[in-house]
Amino acid sequence: MKTTTISDIASIAGVSKSTVSRVLTGNSFVDSSKKVRILKAIEDTEYVPKLAARSLRGSSTRTIGVILNLDPDYHFSDFVSMETLRGISSSAQKSGYRVSVIIEPCNAAIPTIIRDKSVDALIVMGLKEKEEALLSLSNTEGSEIPIVLLNYSQEYKAFPSVSFSNEENAYDFSMYVISMGHEDIGLIDSSRDVLAVANRNHGILRALKESRIRHNPEWYFEYSNISGMEAGKRAASSFMKLERKPSVVIASEDDIALSFIAGITSAGLRVPEDISVVGVDNIPMSQYSNPPLTTEKVEGYRRGIMAFKMLKTLLDGEELKEKHMKIRSVIVERDSLKKIN
């Protein structure tokens, strides 16, 4: 027997799904004639959505939790993540939800949230490998609280996700850098246990392998739990000590790239004459740097909107048309990358 969904109710009543949702939550004015049709359709079909069921039990909070998966002492200033939060918050507000941002490691936050039922649904950012709380949920029936992840991994495939195509994006960007004649390629990264970073590394290394370019470990700089600006500063210091330097450095974030450029130019090098530098994110400052930074445009705001839309579908008791969604980036060509003959 087919389960009745909110779409069915909307079709029977001749209204939109959002109108049905407003009647179920009681948060917005709905024309009385439409409300009568909706309530009759609900009665006739004996429809009880997940959201309504939680409200009847008195446990609906009208709050969406967003876990940043960070140590509370970490200085959070990631542009793309902030844009993602903006997209989530904007969409949530339009649907009558509040957003609670939780700055805490995933494994500590999830058990408490599920036990206390303090939110109606969860979005998890900064996903890392071997998150025990998520793995334990994926191996059981899990929780009635819908969870959407902002990165995809095979080990978490039980959960819906909206992610950037990190490996594919990094592969394409690396091939673009290589097409400009660069074979001596340096890398600056944040924590490799973060899935987004790990996936980007896979893409870069695949591009190098296919192009028969050897990866030099001396040109790989990795930093954990520090700001992008500090990472770029430290990388510049280490870079200047190299006896043999790469012709280009790929930074995993624009703020790392900009800080790195500031460090090496203060030491006497010129960009891109002596070395090319590229970043990822297309933060506003990247177009005003000296020189303007070649980068990838990553659409955090769009990711946030898509994530909330997916979560709202689950809250409404609907089936997802697509469980794992990926977003491609666009290469932004500027002056910090030169072509080598």
Image: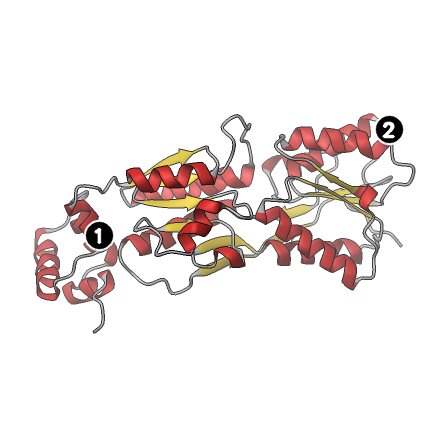
**Element carrying mark 2:** loop
- Residue type, label 1: Ser
Residue 158, compared with residue 110, is above or below; it is below
User: In the figure, residue 87 lies in which quadrant?
Assistant: top left
Along the polypeptide, which appears first: circle 2 or circle 1? 1
Measured from the top left, where is residue 69 in percent x and y?
49, 38
Q: Residue furthest right?
A: 243
Are discs 2 and 1 less than 8 Å apart at CB?
no
Q: Nearer the viewer, residue 135 or 104?
A: 135
**Residue 167: where, in percent of width, then height?**
63, 56
Q: Is residue 99 left or right of residue 166?
A: left
Q: Is residue 180 above or below residue 11?
A: above
Which residue matches tag 1? 21
Q: Which residue is mark 2?
A: 268
Towards the viewer: 184 or 67: 67
Q: Quadrant of the N terminus?
A: bottom left
